[in-house]
């Protein structure tokens, strides 16, 4: 199955698997062999140099991993894809593949905390100039791009503030200066957003999140042209951040229900966002689907749906969070997202644990900011759960008899 014009839900179920099915099995096998044996020395050599399809060593390629890569490639409408042991490996390997001392990268301030650490701690050690613009300030982003950059790196929606950047607009400016435009599409997924169609050169995912969807496998993946993916693959195969076959199988299995999960997660996220808007103990709600969201119009233009991620700030800061979150019955309080279970967590201990309080404050992340990854539970149960949790919070914050 290639890039035929079939719907994305069908692609998620069927694509990328046929070539690796064996013995009449209907499911992709987990191939755990480290090495692959050849009787024909010339065939072995041809496979080793890429002249012929096949596998020689697990750090390079693997049939189960290949099926996962192919499925994501097709969903994103890309020419090629390669995978990694984690989402951060996908991000860092991409930077280290293309950047050299003296290069310049333009990005936004609201990227995931781990990505931000690469920008502020590791890349500067390589004498790479990092320019972090105000997220949503497209004029500032364009001005910095015009000064020249090797990579334009975007994350939209952002983690955890779900801010939106106009991919098509800034990608066009990036192309004018010859930049490689990279978009982290983890929050949106291929169900809701296709960055390559909007002008991006590379699109990446922390597959650990929505693609896998069951919080049981780590992985990362990046898609784009063969010209760009081949050097990223080469860097990864030598430096060793390889996706293991068991994780690839779990990610493949999870992706079969990707469309169904994203649809229910979005329904729940909308309901939670609207509920939170009505709570007197909530300062602000951040969800691209709300008309009050500062980038709502851009989200409507470039996204097919608004996704299952939102965040909110609660009055009383961390003291209130310490009461509210433990009171929830249908919630994992954990540093993960995109799973079938609804997950809550303050940004200070999830997305931006690596950052100092000052660094978090600089990008508008208060200690009372809570990230929510809506799960696939029945919507009514999640709202009732929030109602009882806020009732408990109110008991602790409003004097009795007032």
Image (cartoon, grey):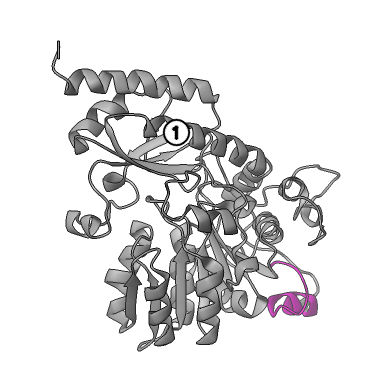
Residue at position x 27%, y 18% in the image: 392
Q: Quadrant of the C terminus?
A: top left
Of residue 369 and residue 342, the one placed in the foreground of this image is: 369
Mark 1 crowd level (few <14, some 14–19, many ≥20, 10 Å Cα) = some
Q: Is residue 54 above or below residue 131?
A: above
Asked if the magenta segment contains residue 49, the reply would be yes
Of residue 212 and residue 34, the one placed in the foreground of this image is: 212
Q: Which residue is mark 1?
A: 274
Query: Which of the 4 image quadrants contains residue 316?
Result: top left
Query: Which of the 4 image quadrants contains residue 172?
Result: bottom right
How far across and down, in percent of the image, does residue 271 sit?
49, 31
How far across and down, in percent of the image, does residue 147 sit?
39, 87
Q: Quadrant of the N terminus?
A: bottom right
Q: Is residue 362 above or below residue 278?
A: below
Left or right: residue 180 compared with residue 245: left
Stretch in magenta: 42-55
Asked if the magenta segment contains residue 395, the reply would be no
Residue 56 visible somewhere in the drawing = no
Residue at position x 18%, y 21% in the image: 396
View extreme (right): residue: 24
Residue at position x 77%, y 55% in the image: 20
View extreme (top): residue: 401
Q: Is residue 253 above or below residue 237?
A: above
Residue 96 visible somewhere in the drawing = yes
Of residue 45 and residue 399, the one placed in the foreground of this image is: 399
- Report helix, strand or loop for mark 1: helix
Of residue 274 and residue 234, the one placed in the foreground of this image is: 274
How far across and down, in percent of the image, does residue 25 sit?
81, 43
């Amino acid at each position: 199955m290639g890039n035929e014009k079939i719907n994305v839900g069908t692609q998620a179920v069927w694509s990328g698997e046929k070539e690796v099915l064996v013995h009449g099995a209907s499911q992709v096998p987990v191939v755990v062999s480290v090495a692959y044996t050849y009787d024909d020395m010339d065939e072995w050599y041809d496979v080793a140099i890429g002249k012929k399809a096949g596998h020689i060593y697990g750090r390079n390629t693997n049939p189960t991993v290949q099926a996962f890569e192919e499925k994501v490639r097709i969903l994103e409408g890309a020419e090629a894809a390669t995978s990694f042991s984690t989402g951060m490996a996908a991000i860092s390997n991409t930077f280290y593949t293309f950047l050299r001392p003296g290069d310049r990268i333009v990005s936004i301030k609201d990227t995931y905390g781990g990505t931000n650490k690469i920008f502020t701690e590791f890349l500067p050690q390589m004498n790479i100039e990092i320019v972090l613009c105000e997220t949503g300030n497209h004029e500032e982003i364009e001005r910095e791009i015009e000064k020249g950059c090797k990579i334009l790196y975007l994350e939209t929606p952002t983690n955890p503030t779900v801010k939106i950047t106009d991919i098509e607009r800034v990608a066009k400016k990036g192309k004018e200066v010859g930049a490689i435009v990279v978009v982290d599409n983890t929050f949106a997924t291929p169900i809701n957003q296709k960055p390559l169609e909007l002008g991006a050169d590379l699109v990446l995912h922390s597959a650990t999140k929505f693609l896998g969807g069951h919080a049981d496998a780590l992985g990362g993946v990046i898609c784009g042209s063969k010209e760009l993916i081949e050097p990223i693959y080469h860097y990864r195969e030598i430096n060793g951040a390889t996706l293991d076959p068991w994780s690839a199988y779990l990610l493949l299995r999870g992706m079969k229900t990707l469309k169904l999960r994203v649809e229910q997660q979005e329904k729940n996220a909308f309901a939670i966002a609207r509920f939170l808007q009505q709570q007197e103990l909530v300062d602000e709600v951040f969800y691209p689907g709300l008309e009050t969201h500062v980038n709502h119009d851009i989200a409507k233009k470039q996204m097919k749906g608004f996704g299952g991620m939102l965040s909110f700030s609660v009055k009383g800061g961390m003291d209130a969070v310490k009461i509210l979150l433990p009171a929830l019955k249908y919630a994992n309080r954990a540093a993960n997202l995109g799973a079938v279970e609804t997950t809550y967590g303050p940004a200070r201990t999830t997305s931006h644990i690596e950052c100092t309080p000052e660094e978090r404050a600089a990008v508008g992340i208060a200690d009372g900011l809570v990230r929510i990854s809506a799960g696939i539970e029945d919507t009514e149960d999640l709202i009732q759960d929030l109602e009882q949790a806020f009732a408990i919070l109110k008991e602790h914050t409003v004097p009795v008899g007032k």
